[in-house]
Image (cartoon, rainbow, N blue to C red):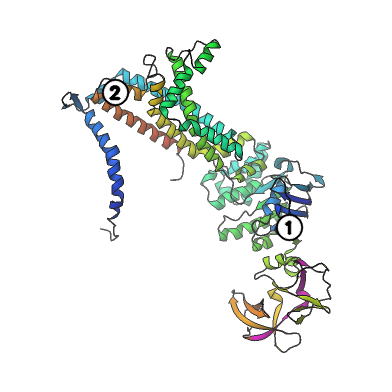
Amino acid sequence: MARIELKDLRHSYLPHPQRADDYALKKVDLVWDNGGAYALLGPSGCGKTTLLNIISGLLCPSEGSILFDGVEVNDLSPEQRQIAQVFQFPVVYDTMTVYDNLAFPLRNRHVAEKQVDERVRAVAEMTDLTDMLHSKAAGLTADGKQKISLGRGLVREDVNVIMFDEPLTVIDPHLKWRLRSKLKELHQRVRMTMIYVTHDQTEALTFADRVVVMHDGWVVQQGTPVELFERPRHTFVGHFIGSPGMNLMPCELADGGARVAGHRIALERAITAPRDAARLELGVRPEFVRFVAPDSEGALPVDVVGVRDTGRSRIVETDFAGHKVRALVPEGVAVPGGRTGVSFEPSRTQIYADGWIVE
Amino acid sequence: MSAKSTNQKAWLLVAPVVILVAFNAVIPLMTVVNYSVQETFGDNLFFFEGMKWFEEVLASERFHDSLLRQLQFTFIILAIEVPLGVAIALAMPRKGFWASVCLVLMAMPLLIPWNVVGAMWNIFALPDIGLLGKTLNAMGFDYNFTRQPVAAWVTLIAMDVWHWTSLVVLLSYAGLSAIPDAYYQAARIDGASSWAVFRYIQLPKLKHVLTIAVLLRFMDSFNIYTEPFVLTGGGPGNSTTLLSLDLVKIALGQFDLGPAAAMSLIYFLIILLFSWIFYTVMTRGEDK
């Protein structure tokens, strides 16, 4: 097992990258601690898989270095790096039995047959494959095959990190939840470093202790699920995580607060914008927008436009001086109609300059 | 009767194909069946003979010999072309300029008319003027495919390998290209050797295209006529007289319509039988 560090990592699929846009990964600095459960979250095409393949050694980065326990491994092959990886689509060796599939990574490394048997049985137990050990892998269903892939990832004890590249894409929704809990449970049992790549925030937030959010080749935030929710460091994190995402509106900063369309909005403390900021935005999550009497102190005048019921709560869409502001109202609380007032909770209202949080 | 309504008009749409197939396949085949049970004389005189020709053909040593030669030829070329084709496909670059160059080069022999292939190899192998024949003789080999049965066989097989290995290559190449990268990546991470990659990933994934390749090569080689006809004409002696060459000799050379028709049908049934056996064996153990 190892602590994995990525230093000044950049990667481009072009032979001679010129502009920032030529890079699929734009300067990544990250540390993955030994034994952690991490999620790598971001939309399709943000560079997640590129980053994963660089860690596993399937890709060589254009610039920067990867360190396992402080030792640079840039030039080491995937075998030498001692990592395991589970892919988006199940990879099974069709002609082998489930048992031989699970034993394959060990046999390739010439592990003694007695140990192989022990490990295969232990892993089959973990992944519910014990009953099928001696059937042909080709005959299994998609989720059975993906369990084999997961099993092959878990079978070696000496791996530095296990990486999962959207492993539950092909799995039925009801099994997804079970396999995910299973993975979480496995992590608690074996305490190996696991990196779980996904574009699904629920998957990321339920699996991981720490989530790394990527956007357009950048790592925009690394933190616990609570940190991502309460203090998104980038507007992308704000609207990508949470359902619905953060309310964002252009603003100015004046006398210790923010101003949006002439209305003063209180902040937790006075903030000065960086001098070269081209665009200032105010962000507040729908969870922290409250309805208040329109004539009360600091109330912002809004018009209620629509209400959407999500089951547990209702999303109220309002119009605030031309900006869309959504508020989350719990079930059983009355939703006002027409013209009313809202207030933003100052401690949860953030200011963003060119997308990045101002502290 | 079921209450499901049947659209009878659909038959109208199928009719053109049925008529076409009737004219180019069913009717000629039935004519052959007709010949095979009759004795033919001049002036269009026919006498019904029943199974006589079939019995005669099946019992004749000549038929046994050419069938044996045919089986030999087919199994030799399959044993060479299939492994060689897969090996070439594995060695070919996957993308880029050279991939296209290789594909075009590989497609070339398939584009050449069959009798031209025969003529090319005939001239190429002539011991006195052909590049191959002359070179071999200059190197001290006593090589003359018009006189030595072994030399004729070697030339015939070399020609077929040259002509048809490309088909196996192209099919295998397509099959290999269809294997997702994830398999290779997973194999690298699992620490698989390149032999293991071939044995457990590439070969199983090629199974379907190889079934097709073997079937096509089997049927085509069993039907082969033009190239050996142009190259050796069945000689020297009868040493390269394959089934189709023999059949043409009987039908057109000797104008024995009855035996030739019976032989054609037996020939056809042999190909059908072997193809069915191949197909059944190679797709055995798969989901229904």
SS class, disc 1: strand
- Rendered image quadrant of residue B9: bottom left
SS class, disc 2: helix
Question: Does residue B64 appear to the left or right of B100 in the view shown?
Answer: left
Q: Name the residue under label 1.
A: A218
**Real-space Cα distance between discs 2 and 1?**
78 Å
Q: Three-letter amino acid code at disc 2?
A: Leu
For the residues beneath circles 2 and 1, the answer to whether they share a chain is no
The C terminus of chain A: image quadrant: bottom right
Q: Does the magenta stretch include residue A124?
A: no
Q: Residue B28 carries which label?
A: none
* Residue A181 rendering spot, x and y as whole percentages: 64, 59
Q: Which of A162 and B36 is in front in this view?
A: B36
Residue drawn at (65%, 35%) of the image? B193
User: Which residue appears farthest toward the front when viewing the image?
Assistant: B129
Mark 1 burial class by Cα count in 10 Å: few <14, some 14-19, many 20+: some
User: Which circle, 2 or 1, is nearer the viewer?
Assistant: 1
Question: Does residue B75 appear to the left or right of B14 in the view shown?
Answer: right
Main secondary-structure element of the magenta-colored stretch: strand
User: Which residue appears farthest toward the bottom when viewing the image?
Assistant: A295
* Residue B54 rendering spot, x and y as whole percentages: 26, 26
Residue drawn at (35%, 23%) of the image? B245
Which span is picked out in magenta?
A: A339-359
Q: Is residue A343 magenta?
A: yes
* Residue B89 rendering spot, x and y as whole percentages: 55, 34
Q: Which of A266 and A196 is in front in this view?
A: A266
Q: Which mark is residue B58?
A: 2
